[in-house]
Image (cartoon, coloured by chain):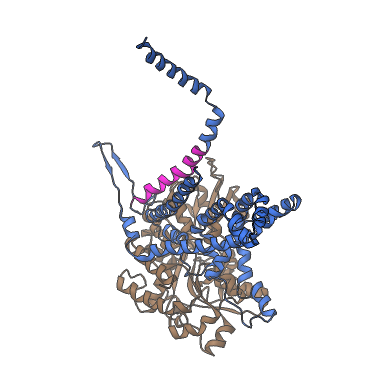
Chain colours: A brown, B blue
Amino acid sequence: MKMKRKLLSLMCTVLVSGSVAAEDKVLNIYNWSDYIAPDSVANFEKETGIKVNYDVYDSNEVLEAKLMAGGSGYDLVMPSNSFFERQVQAGIYQEIDKTKLSNIGNLDAQLAGQLARHDTGNKHNIPYAWGTVGIGYNVDMVKARLGDVEIDSLDMLLKPDVAAKLADCGIAVLDSPAEIMATVNNYMGQDPNSEKLDVLKASADLMAKVRPSYKYFHSSQYISDLANGEICVALGYNGDILQAQDRAAEAGQGVNVGYVIPKEGALVWFDVMAIPKDAPHPEAALKYIDYILRGDVAADLSNYVFYAVPNTAAEPMLDAEVSENKGIYPTQAVKDKLFIQVAHTKKFDRSLTRAWSNIKTGR
Amino acid sequence: MNNITPYVGKGAMAVRLVHRIKAMNWGRMAVILTPTLWLAVFFFIPFLVVFKISLAESAIAVPPYSPLFEWNPEEAYATLKITFGNYLFLFESRFYLDAYLSSIRIAAISTFITLVIAFPIAYLIAKSSRTRRTLLLSLVILPFWTSFLLRVYAWMGLLKKNGVVNEFLMGLGITDHPLIMLQTDFAVYVGIVYTYLPFMILPLYTTLEKMDLALLEAAKDLGAKPYQAFFLVTLPLAIPGIVAGCLLVFIPAVGEFVIPALLGGSDTLMIGRVLWDEFFLNRDWPMASAVATVMLIVLVGPIMFIRSRNKQEDAP
């Protein structure tokens, strides 16, 4: 779930060179932008002699629209879990032959096991990376407004009087109805994945109350805004916020960004690797999956993108800066409070989108 | 003899018809056919596809909607399934109506502002010397050389809280705290007016350039003050340019997506964004198609009306 710059990908419609070369010496990958260590693809090409066409997207929605239209020509895609669940239901993925993956033993069984909620028996996916939806904040600006309190609660965003104190320095929230409403449901003590309309209404009412304190809903804008001090609080993806932290430190303008997984619990998401049914080069895709499962490649990925990888062999090779960061690899106590978001029914989705549009437009 | 005349007449008519077909200018045919084909391939057929999808139900499948027409070869029967549910859903709450109205309002206001800014510019260009004119016109077109998206991003840099405009205003002491301009309707108006200004200037320029300056002198001789000459002579003569410019700005502005998405706030309600949400967030292609179909009807109706009125006025 990185960098959902919807517009860019919409404008520069990326064309996959749908080369239908029958031999498996080509591999068409469609991945999130900025979601691989810089030399990983080049090394894979060198080791295997397979030519990789590497395209990027920045929102699950764009990926899904392409896959659902059919005939995308891609061999390997990286959707997020709840999107993946619906895509599996639509029958667009082929089963992954795990006997061909020599590094499958490196996978963190506990984490990977959670994905069975989306994909019975985990037949169609291998997890790529995972992260949380939590609070990114500007340390000094928040301190100036809230005083010396511990920053660890969603109250900042969801308690009207607390949020109001932060309104003037700017609060941003992901423009992602399912993920945010699951987070709000959980905050209200409800099942995050509830499809009860009264639960939706209660959460929407709470959002309507705090909405006047929010500056905008957007899924990528907050990265640079948090780094520049344009906003002071963001409910967003951990990797994006840590990226903002990195950028702010590099800019040296005195902006200090922090990330915390709220004590009420947070949404955990996975991006998985999956092979479309009509993939022209499935064998090459399997080779690439096996390559990503290698400890050193997975560690490079995590060290570079600041997301956690579900790979036990990677652990000793992680930079201390990454492995000791509780925003990336949380403690077991925090992990126990994380929840996943499952795909909603079509009917509920409609109500959800409607409620979300009303919240966003403040009506 | 009497019997023969009509017979000959008929023969003559047939001959004339053959002659006419032979004489028909194939070049002219091609000229008429090309835009018709263009319209069919790039407008009418895509619209039919969209309309067809709007009558389906969304489904978790590839493609993500139910088929309209199904043929069962074993039992030799066909089913045609049409649902109007998507259109009914459009009118179930005020949300979509508000989105249409708000888009039309934003587009209308920006069209008016564009006109007010573009008119003096076009007038000055038309009045300037031939060499200056070429230079000024190329300056109007110059922004097209950079990507539209980049220019909108540049406006984000100008309008943001620590942006150039705020630094400038605070430096001059006009305001002591940064003004909130980005993510407001104001920024949307700035973006639309800026982007579409050339589309207003160019048609205005072409009509104003053709204007006979002797008419203004005549008005002056007959005692009209400059402003009277402007409202009584210049403005009426410029009407074709004004109509063309306004349509060129208004129509794309109603469906604008990029500008409200980048410069507007989350509460800037425009139909382009609603469409995006239906298509991508909701993955409801039929619903998105219904929204698009209604938008087309909302837009095409008034335009046809204006065009037919224009034709009547043109007719002697």
Q: Is residue A37 visible?
A: no
- Residue A123, image quadrant: bottom left
Which of B245/B210 is in front?
A: B210
Relative to B204, B51 lies left or right: left
Which of A282/B293 is in front?
A: B293
Residue furthest out toward the bottom: A148
The quarter of the picture where the C terminus of chain A appears is bottom left
Which of A316/B144 is in front?
A: B144
Secondary structure mostly seen in the magenta stretch: helix
Q: Residue A176: horizontal and vertical position, in percent?
A: 45, 67
Q: Residue A292: horizontal and vertical position, in percent?
A: 54, 58
- Residue A352, image quadrant: bottom left
Q: Residue B206: horizontal and vertical position, in percent?
A: 63, 49
| B15 in magenta | no
Q: Which residues are magenta?
A: B35-56
Q: Is residue B161 above or below residue A103?
A: below
Residue furthest out toward the front: B222
Q: Residue B180: horizontal and vertical position, in percent?
A: 57, 76
| B50 in magenta | yes
Residue furthest out toward the left: B75
Q: Residue at x 53, y 36 (%)?
A: B34
Q: Residue at x 50, y 85 (%)?
A: A165
Q: How many marks?
A: 0
Relative to A222, A192 lies left or right: left
Q: Is residue B300 above or below residue A34?
A: above
